Amino acid sequence: MFDIGFPELLLIGVVTLLVIGPDQLPSTMRTVALWIGRFRRGFADIRRDIEQGIGADEIRQQLHNEAILKEIERSKAAIAQTNAEIDNLAREAKSAMKASEADGSADSSSEPKTPSPNERSTREP
């Protein structure tokens, strides 16, 4: 929050020691620490009251739920795309099989059938 380094803290300590004096420094530091604690607690209470008033917890939960729903929608879209690709591949495979079967039947009907070695031996006189 504050950009205070070690040299600045040392300077503040020396000035405080000179202004307040070594006799009253411990009691003054205790008083300052008590006031700082009270301010922090007061600000924390105010922050908590404001968050409760505006429903910050519900808003955080809603944002979290929306993020989860967006992730689910992205997953559904990816699954649908994958299913479409699988369907396309299946259709292509079926058409390729039908084409190869058609080519195989066309080849076998147009080419003369060569007899197998067993058929040759039975046909020869």
Image (spheres, rainbow, N blue to C red):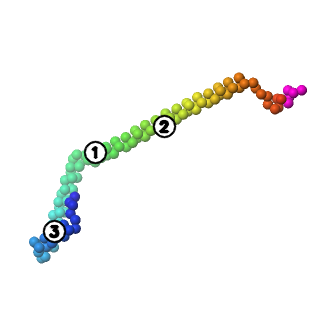
The amino acid sitting under disc 1 is Ile
Q: Is residue 72 above or below residue 23?
A: above
Residue 109 located left or right of residue 61:
right
Residue drawn where x is 79% and y is 28% of the image: 115
Tell me, for residue 76, which label it has, or none. none
Task: Check disc 3 and report its element: helix, strand or loop.
Answer: helix
Q: Is residue 117 above or below residue 49?
A: above
The residue to which callout 1 is attached is 59
Q: Is residue 122 magenta?
A: yes
Task: Check disc 1 and report its element: helix, strand or loop.
Answer: helix
Residue 121 located left or right of residue 63:
right
The residue to which callout 2 is attached is 82
Label 2 and label 3: CA atoms lie apart by 66 Å
Residue 104: x and y, percent? 67, 28
Residue 70: x and y, percent? 37, 40
Q: Quadrant of residue 119?
A: top right
Q: Is the C terminus in the top left, top right, bottom left or bottom right quadrant?
A: top right
Q: Quadrant of residue 92?
A: top right
